[in-house]
Amino acid sequence: MSGIIGTVGARSGIVGQTQSGSGLQSSFNVKLSANQDNIASGVTILFNTLQAPNIGGDFNTSTYTYTAPVTGMYTFLVNAYQENVDNVHNYSRAILQTSNRGYGGSIFDTRVWSGSCWLFGQNIGVLTEMEAGDIAFVYHNYSGGTSTTDYSSASFFSGYFTGITY
C-alpha cells in the first residue's frame, strides 16, 4: 500500500488511497418521510429520513444537505419520482446542486401530454470533485404552469466519498 499517512481536517488516513484503503469514509442514503406536495420551482426536496447509516454524519436531515468532509471525488445518485406533473410546464425536473454547479435530470416538455402525468421518474448520477465544506442538495425546477407537482416518498438521494484527488 502506497501513500502518505496524514490528517485531512478532523479525519486521519492514508493520503492518496481510495475510500476503501484510506479510512476516510462518508456515505448516506436518504428518502422523503412523506410525499412533498405542490412543490414550487426552486424549492429544496425534503430528503429527511435515513435509509442507511449516515457514515461520517455528513448528511444533515434538518437542512437536507450533504457537506463534503474533505476535498476529493464524490459520487451522488438521485431517483426523483414526480407525481401529478402539470401538462402546461415547458419542463419539469430535479436538480442536484453542489457548491460549484448543478446537475439536471432529463428535461421533458410536459406540454406533449394530453393531461397531467401521474408518475414521472428521473435519475441523476454524477461523479464530481468537491472541496471540504462544499454542499450538495436536490431541488425542483420547472418553467411555466403551476405548482401541482408532488415528489413521491419513494424518491431517494444517496452519495459517498470516492477518493482524494490532487
Image: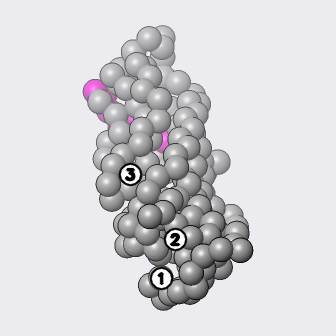
Sequence-wise first label, 1 or 2: 1
Q: Amino acid at mark 3?
A: Gln
Determine contact: label 1, label 3, CB under 8 Å: no
Circle 2 sits in a helix, a strand or a loop, which is it? strand
Q: Residue at x 33, y 59 (%)?
A: 99
**Of residues 165 and 63, which is closer to you in this image?**
165
Residue furthest to the front in view is: 2
Q: Residue at x 38, y 51 (%)?
A: 97
Circle on res. 97: 3
Q: Which residues are magenta?
A: 144-153
Q: Residue at x 48, y 11 (%)?
A: 114
Q: To which quarter of the image does residue 145 belong?
A: top left
Circle on res. 8: 1
CA distance for labels 1 and 3? 24 Å
Determine contact: label 1, label 2, CB under 8 Å: no
Q: In the rendered image, which quarter contains the C terminus?
A: bottom left
**Of residues 116 and 165, which is closer to you in this image?**
165
Labels 1, 2: front one = 1
Q: Position of residue 88 (x, y in %)?
A: 35, 20
Q: Amino acid at mark 2?
A: Phe
Q: Residues within 10 Å of mark 2 (few under 14, many from 20)?
A: many
